[in-house]
Image (tube, grey):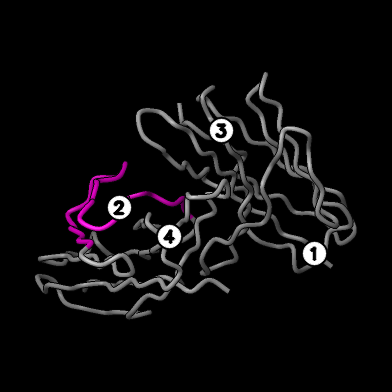
């Protein structure tokens, strides 16, 4: 089992609220990712990080922001939630020091904005 | 054109059938290749890596054809528990290392 955790698992929140989705991994991985996935649809990369103090935007434009102050922690923040943000958010990490490049995913946060 | 393309399916097969999934990728600089499995409403998990020489893990066989930029996954003797979405994943080094997930092929195995 991967040691990567996301909280909350489920969140229902009203429009305009600020929310932070938490992601932590205990594997010491440098690279971390946030994906957005609607039911039955493909994964979309929204943010990634190569390590502490490194953050990059992914392929899908997102109104969210991320930070990477500690290796193990990669939170995602929505300043003002909207119904269009309703989706599943998956956090992942990978260790590219070897040749594996396997991404380990957290269980996801299912967000509903009413 | 997407960088990684898969037949979305769904593939509906009876138990015991052999089923094959294909995946094509557009970046010739792609370096490593994987199949992931994603169960309904769950996170993706690595199923197997794909090597140039082809590789097998029990009932699963993965093959890579670099010349045609094509990856395949063969599942023999399908089980009900094989029902899932199978994601083709490609790593490429294009001015920075990048992992690209295909949209997935959905498989339903029926009794």
Q: Nearer the viewer, residue A70 or A60?
A: A70
Q: Residue at x 75, y 43 (%)?
A: B62
Query: Can marks 2 and 1 be said to lie on one chain?
Result: no
- CA separation in Å, label 2 and label 3: 20 Å
Q: Which structural element holds mark 4?
A: strand
Q: Which structural element holds mark 1?
A: strand
Q: Which residue is mark 1?
A: B110
Q: Which structural element holds mark 3?
A: strand
Q: Quadrant of the N terminus of chain B?
A: top left
Can residue B19 be seen by looking at this rendering? yes
Disc 2: host chain = A
Query: Can marks 3 and 4 be said to lie on one chain?
Result: no
Could you say which disc has been placed on residue A49 in the image? 2
The answer to whether residue A26 is left or right of residue B34 is: left
Secondary structure of the magenta portion, mostly?
Answer: loop
Can residue A35 be seen by looking at this rendering? no
Q: Which residue is mark 4?
A: A93
Q: Which residue is mark 3?
A: B31
Q: Nearer the viewer, residue A67 or A83?
A: A67
Earlier residue among tags 1 and 3? 3
Q: Nearer the viewer, residue B104 or B9?
A: B104
Q: Residue at x 78, y 38 (%)?
A: B54
Q: Nearer the viewer, residue B17 or A75?
A: A75
Q: Residue furthest top?
A: B67
Label 3: how many Cα within 10 Å (few below 14, some 14–19, many 20+) = few
Disc 4: host chain = A
Q: Which structural element holds mark 2?
A: strand
Q: Which residues are magenta?
A: A41-68
The answer to whether residue A64 is left or right of residue B21 is: left
Q: Is residue B10 magenta?
A: no
């Amino acid at each position: 089992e991967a040691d990567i955790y996301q909280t909350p698992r489920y969140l229902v929140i009203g429009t305009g609220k600020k929310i932070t989705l938490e992601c932590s991994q205990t594997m010491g991985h440098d690279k971390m990712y946030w994906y957005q996935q609607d039911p039955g649809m493909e994964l979309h990369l929204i943010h990634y990080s190569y390590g502490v103090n490194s953050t990059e935007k992914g392929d899908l434009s997102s109104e969210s922001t991320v930070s990477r102050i500690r290796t193990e922690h990669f939170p995602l923040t929505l300043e003002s939630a909207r119904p269009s943000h309703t989706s599943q958010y998956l956090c992942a990490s990978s260790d590219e020091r070897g040749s594996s490049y396997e991404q380990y995913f957290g269980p996801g946060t299912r967000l509903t904005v009413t | 054109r997407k960088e990684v393309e898969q037949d979305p399916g769904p593939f509906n097969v009876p138990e015991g059938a052999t089923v094959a999934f294909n995946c094509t990728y557009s970046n010739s600089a792609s370096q490593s290749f994987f199949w992931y499995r994603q169960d309904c409403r769950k996170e993706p998990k690595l199923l197997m890596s794909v090597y140039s020489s082809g590789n097998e893990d029990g009932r699963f066989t993965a093959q890579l054809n670099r010349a045609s930029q094509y990856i395949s996954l063969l599942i023999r003797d399908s089980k009900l528990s094989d029902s899932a979405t199978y994601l083709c994943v490609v790593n490429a080094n294009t001015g920075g290392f990048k992992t690209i997930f295909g949209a997935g092929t959905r498989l339903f195995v029926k009794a």
